[in-house]
Amino acid sequence: MFRKITAALAVTLGLSFLVPALGAEPASAAPVAARTIYYDASGAQEFKAAVDEGAAAWNQAVPEIELKPATGGQATIKVYADDGWPRTISYGFGQGTIYMGREAVNDGFYPPRIAAHELGHTLGLPDNRNGRCDYLMSGHSSPTSCQSTTPHATEAAQVSQNAGGRVPATFSKPIRYDDCFTF
Ligand SMILES: [Zn+2]
């Protein structure tokens, strides 16, 4: 039996360096227009529908954003499939490259939940391996039986804030999130 350990890699560096860059809170409490974020799942092979499902879950939970399939070259999130571990390299809020790694799928994890988790990284959320199925960012610390794609209210609130400028549109260097198990 594999012991599940995570290679959090850049995660700890991840958002901590962003904190000084946080601006003042918006002066107005007026409703914010939804920010459209285009994704391209044409390279996601058998996971295209899973990516759409993950995106829909975020759209439903966070009124400030709308993840939409790209129709041209405007995608800032690109999703691929490969045989490695699921992972995301994020370049800024709503910007990133996602790999729907088959290792986790082969271990029994639910593809739409993997997609929602990886999209969460592109929306500025770090891993939060608390083992809870009701959190998307718990990732593989939750059991493989967990098929929830709904963000926890806390996660949805964080993404709302991130969309409002809490996470920069472009990072000074990419943040990599590796959702892998090692021995
Ligand atoms: Zn992750």
Image (cartoon, rainbow, N blue to C red):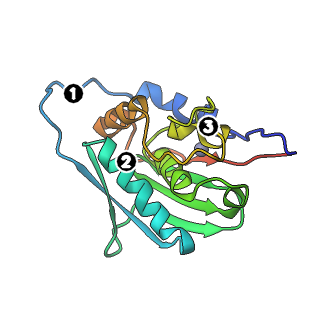
Relative to 2, does residue 26 appear above or below in the rendering?
above
- Quarter of the picture containing the C terminus is top right
Q: Secondary structure at mark 3?
A: helix
Relative to 44, does residue 181 appear above or below in the rendering?
above
Kind of residue sitting beneath label 3 = Val
* Residue under the point 43% across and 34% down: 152
Report whether residue 15 is seen: yes
* Residue under the point 12% across and 31% down: 30
Kind of residue sitting beneath label 1 = Pro
- Quarter of the picture containing the N terminus is top right
The Cα atoms of the two marked residues, 2 and 3, are separated by: 21 Å
Q: Nearer the viewer, mark 1 or mark 2?
A: 2
Q: Nearer the viewer, mark 2 or mark 3?
A: 2
Between discs 2 and 3, the one toward the N terminus: 3
Q: Secondary structure at mark 1?
A: loop
Quarter of the rendered structure image containing ligand 1: top right
Mark 1 Cβ inside 8 Å of ligand 1? no
Where is mark 3, residue-wise?
11
* Residue under the point 39% across and 40% down: 168
Which x, y percent locates residue 144?
Answer: 66, 47
The answer to which quarter of the image holds residue 164 is top left
Dot 2: within a 10 Å radius of its alpha carbon, few (fewer than 14), some, or many (20 or more) residues? Answer: many
Where is mark 1, residue-wise?
26
Between discs 1 and 3, the one toward the N terminus: 3
The Cα atoms of the two marked residues, 1 and 2, are separated by: 22 Å
Which x, y percent locates residue 33?
Answer: 17, 45
Between discs 1 and 2, the one toward the N terminus: 1
Kind of residue sitting beneath label 2 = Trp
